[in-house]
Image (tube, helix red, strand yellow):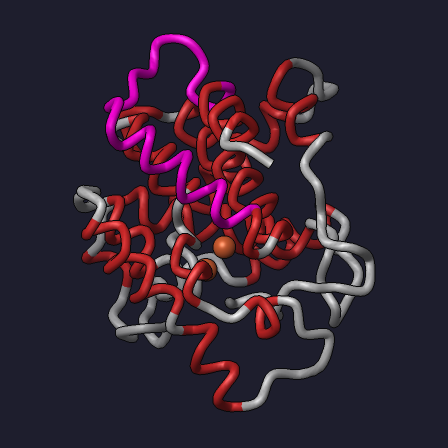
Amino acid sequence: MTQWGARRALEALAGTGLELDADLKKQACHLLHRLERHHPASYAHSLRVARLTMAMWRAAPDRLGCGATALLGSALHDAGKLQVPASCLASPAPLSAEERRLVQAHATAGASLLATLGFRSPILDVAAHHHERWEGGGYPTGRPTAEFAPIVRAVAVADAFTAMTEPGRSYRKPLPREAARDELLACRGSQFDPEAVDLLLQALAQKAAPKRGRMARLLGRVQLAPPRRFLAPIGF
Ligand SMILES: [Fe+2]
Ligand SMILES: [Fe+2]
């Protein structure tokens, strides 16, 4: 297994006209490759979240800021899972309180890890705060997300939608997209930034055309965890 897959995936997500800093791109490829080896389902999840975030960014680039930041922030939002034991990430059983604490620590751990590698805010904020809630009460700080950059709130919504609809979760089957969309709408203005939810719905409408192209083919080749190995519950 090499970094080739991660590099190709990042380049496909960037498309043409989106320049990534060479050193940060190299670091991102390395981290994604490590995540692929550590817990393949988290790697696949990260690429899915990045693909959806970039669809949101392309739908409204002025609202989400720098495209390279959107790409690197979304692709690396769960980098902290590198520091969570794979046994916790893949546990088919309900997590103990201590395991839950370990998994939830991925947010802060990810931001710290990315900072040591030269990444800056808001990429660090995406990693640290993508499990915070619009009205507050999420983790790790419980702060309302209005104080963070829009890309943080956008990744939070893309992350939740992806977690609800992707395969590889122990506690339930993937939700149909329509049900996941209804769930986002139900949490619009409480857990999620209303504008971010609207942006995701806009992006999904634009993505409704049949999937073709390089990124779809790449994601089709991503190895998911075996069927009996699952990710931790949504919200992680
Ligand atoms: Fe996360
Ligand atoms: Fe995630």
Which quadrant of the view contains residue 214? Answer: top right
Q: For ligand 1, which image quadrant applies? A: bottom left
Vertical order, 64 against 186 (above or below):
above
- Image point 56% across, 29% down: which residue? 5
Q: Quadrant of residue 24?
A: top left
Residue pictured at 48% horizontal, 47% vertical: 34
On-image quarter of the N terminus: top right
Most distant residue in the top direction: 16
In the rendered view, tell whether residue 36 sits above or below residue 29: below
Count of numbered tags: 0
Residue 167, horizontal then vertical, whole percent: 74, 52
Residue 71: x %, y % from top left: 38, 32
Horizontal side of 57 relative to 39 (left or right) equals left
Residue 190 visible in rendering: no
- Where residue 171 appears, as percent x and y from the top left, is 74, 72
Question: What x and y, as percent, mark residue 42?
Answer: 57, 53
Is residue 62 in view? Answer: yes
Q: Is residue 42 magenta?
A: no
In front of the other: 170 or 202: 170
Q: Nearer the viewer, residue 39 or 93?
A: 39
Task: Name the main secondary structure of what is drawn in magenta.
Answer: helix
Q: What are the residue bounds of the magenta stretch?
A: 12-36
**Residue at 26 percent of width and 74 percent of height:** 141
Between 35 and 17, the residue placed more toward the observer is 35
Q: Is residue 230 above or below residue 150?
A: below
Q: Residue furthest bottom?
A: 97
- Side of 68 where 165 appears, left or right: right
Q: Is residue 231 left or right of residue 159?
A: right
In the image, what residue occupies the spot 65% across and 25% down?
A: 218
Magenta region includes residue 17: yes
